Amino acid sequence: MINDIWILATAALVAASCALVGVFLILRRQALMGDAISHSVLLGIVLAYLITDSRSLPVMLGGAVIIGLVTAWLSDSLHRFGKLQSDASIGIIFTLFFAIGVILVSLYAGQIDLDQECVLYGEIAFVPFDTITIGGLDNDKESGFEIGPRAFWGIGIVFSIVLISIVVGFNRLKTVAFHPNLAISLGINVVFWHYFLMTLVSITTVASFDAVGAILVVALLVIPASSAYLLASSLKSMLWLAVAYSQAAVVIGYSLSYILDSSISASIAVSAGILLFITILVLQVQKKLRQKRVITIKMVETVKTTL
Amino acid sequence: MDAFTLINPPSLWDNWLAFWSFEDMNVLWVLIGSILLGMSASVIGGFAFLRRRSLIGDALAHAALPGVMMAFLLFQTRDPLIMFLGAVTSSFIGFFLIDWLPKNTKIKADAALAITLSFFFALGLMLLSFIQGLEVSNKSGLDKILFGQAAAMTEEDIRLLAVVTIFILVTVSLFFQKFRLIAFNQTYAKTIGLAVNRYELLLALLIVMSVVVGLQLVGVVLMAAVLLTPIAAARYWSSQLSHILIIAASLGALSAIISTQISYLAPAMPTGPWMVVSLSMLFIISLIFAPKKGLLKRYLEHKALRQKVSEENILRTLYKLVERQSFQHHHFNQADILGLRSVPADCLQNTLKLLCKKSLITSDPKGFKLTEKGLEKAIQLTRRHRLWENYLNEQADLTPDQVHQQAERIEHILTDEQEAQLRLELTNSLLDPHGNPIPDASNHVSPQLKKVQEPLT
């Protein structure tokens, strides 16, 4: 029971951080960059682990941020100096990074507790078993005080970073997202904010990695934010809606996985997608009805005038 | 490769020999299959690239996953044809979703791609984990399509692969003209009455088929690179579509050979990532070293042009100095040159050295002097410069103040024919707009012009 709560809490934080960052990705039309970074973060994690031999949070975050920024920067340079379409250059870079990451994982599978499955699904079901203890001696877990799963605290810290960044930089982020040109003319450093956003994406993906794997993060980044984009009328409402959608997806997905005995993270992503499609369906039906009403009003008017 | 040799060094060479002696007939078939796949995926990816939909392969490959799982759930069989049909169906649904979302909702094209990709992939993983919880036979190996495993392919798999890839290659070569027209100029294709929608659909079907048939070999996650990277690399080698496609196909085939070998030498290795890594290496080589549009070539060309321009500028400066001295005095030092044209000192010294080496000028204690050859070159440049100034002045109605900058640039690239043409179009080809004489093609300034020159100096 306590395990279920830890899993749900971790999933909720993962979904919420992804939704918040995703809003800016959608607005800046950088959805594919989110896809790319979430793939290449794998290489960052593996390299950071192989170099430092530790899986502590700062090391993982550092590796992910560096590789995320390198991905963004390399795609941009390839686009400019290699004269390639921007989506093509993104595609070439992230597939290479991801491929190297997968090769390293399968080479050192014994040493890293990562495998190809985990890269894809994440292992949110095992999150409660990897806990942090404080106060005790290093090798004696019993004596310390257990404060909860590692993944939970990791995503908790990242969630606070994301939240604080958005609250503090709200106006800047808003201007850059909606009017990049106005932002430039106001003297805002658009390049800085671009790479800042990429940093947020990187740390969010790496903290979500344990829980949902490299690829399902994309679903959590893009789908709730897109649902919110369809309904929202301001940045603030879009952020709130995205978080609401993501939390609904967590609850529905968790129950779905319980019923079908399927992967928790995949079910959460699927529920997010289903919520998006329901939203689109409702909006389309509304549009059709509105059109019909307009047509009948017009017909009534023409009949009146002809009479 | 290095890291890999560390794991099992002794058997590597034997394995490699065994691979190439084709002791196992299956090896040969897999090799042929992967070469065919590499070729067809690169060619069809080329058209996706030209339609500016480079990442469509990524989304379609991910979208195939739930189809495979659904087909397995419904028919409880691993028959390649049924899997193929399931994958094609769900990939096609994904294709229409990517198309439909941006047209009918506020969602933008890039987001539509990411949504489709991640949703279908999640659905596929959910079904896969559901299947793994079920008590059904031969479910093992379904997850191999995530990263691809060439060694795990069966004979039927390869037969299907060969049939589909050959079908793709034949169809593309049959409709090459039409696909090319649609890729480059859709509006024109429509106006000449081509059924563009039908060909678009055919192209989409071919893309979906090549993606789906490659899943066994390359895997869902990295299929995008097999469609995209070869064409991006080939673009640096040529600018003609048929050549680009042939080069892309060869690159695809080459990477297929490399990755299939690795997959056999180390059966635990997934094939897809190795194929992507070898393709990316080929891409990087092309990006840097390609003889037509590679970075190195562009850099060298740029450097050579800069060098040529600075040499020619110095030659012309020397000529102007000679002209100012009414062809009496021929030796000038660096200060004289710097007085007429501001150049960084070290750059000037380098250029002067190079000019000496080419024996366009000579250097002695009195200073630098144009040689016969150098004078000829300098006269030619000055003539072109002044002819162009005249041309702009006469035909483009620019004032004499405006023409110098433009002529400064064009003098380096005008050809003999263009020079003759300029001369034909000009009424006055004796004096430039600033009143300086235009030197004759044969040699120095003609005698009557020298008279004009004298009061000026």
Image (cartoon, rainbow, N blue to C red):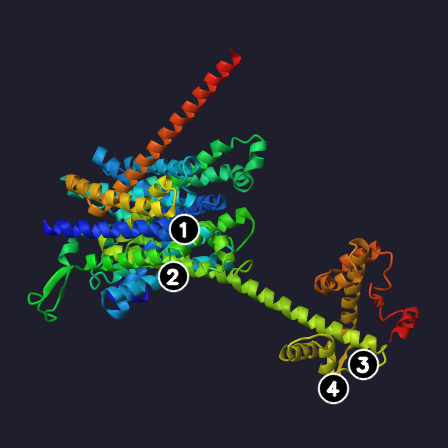
Residue A221's place in the image compared with B357, above or below, is: above
Spatial CA span between label 4 and label 2:
57 Å
Please indicate whether residue B456 sits to the left or right of residue A49 in the image: right
Numbered disc in front, either 4 or 2: 2
Query: Which mark is drawn over residue A30?
Result: 1
Label 3 sits on residue: B330
Residue lying at the far top in this picture: please name it.
A307
Mark 3: amino acid: His
10 Å neighbourhood of mark 1: few (<14), some, or many (≥20)? Answer: some
Instruction: Check contact, mark 1 vs mark 4: CB within 8 A.
Output: no
Whether labels 1 and 4 share one chain? no
Instruction: Determine whether the residue tagged by mark 3 lies in a helix, strand or loop.
Output: loop
Of labels 2 and 1, earlier in sequence is: 1
Of labels 4 and 3, earlier in sequence is: 3
Instruction: Determine whether the residue tagged by mark 1 lies in a helix, strand or loop.
Output: loop
Whether labels 1 and 3 share one chain? no
Spatial CA span between label 1 and label 4:
64 Å
Q: Chain of mark 2?
A: A
Spatial CA span between label 4 and label 3:
12 Å
10 Å neighbourhood of mark 2: few (<14), some, or many (≥20)? Answer: some
Instruction: Determine whether the residue tagged by mark 4 lies in a helix, strand or loop.
Output: strand
Instruction: Check contact, mark 4 vs mark 2: CB within 8 A.
Output: no
Label 4 sits on residue: B364
Query: Which mark is drawn over residue A69?
Result: 2
Spatial CA span between label 3 and label 2:
59 Å
Q: Chain of mark 4?
A: B
Mark 1: amino acid: Gln
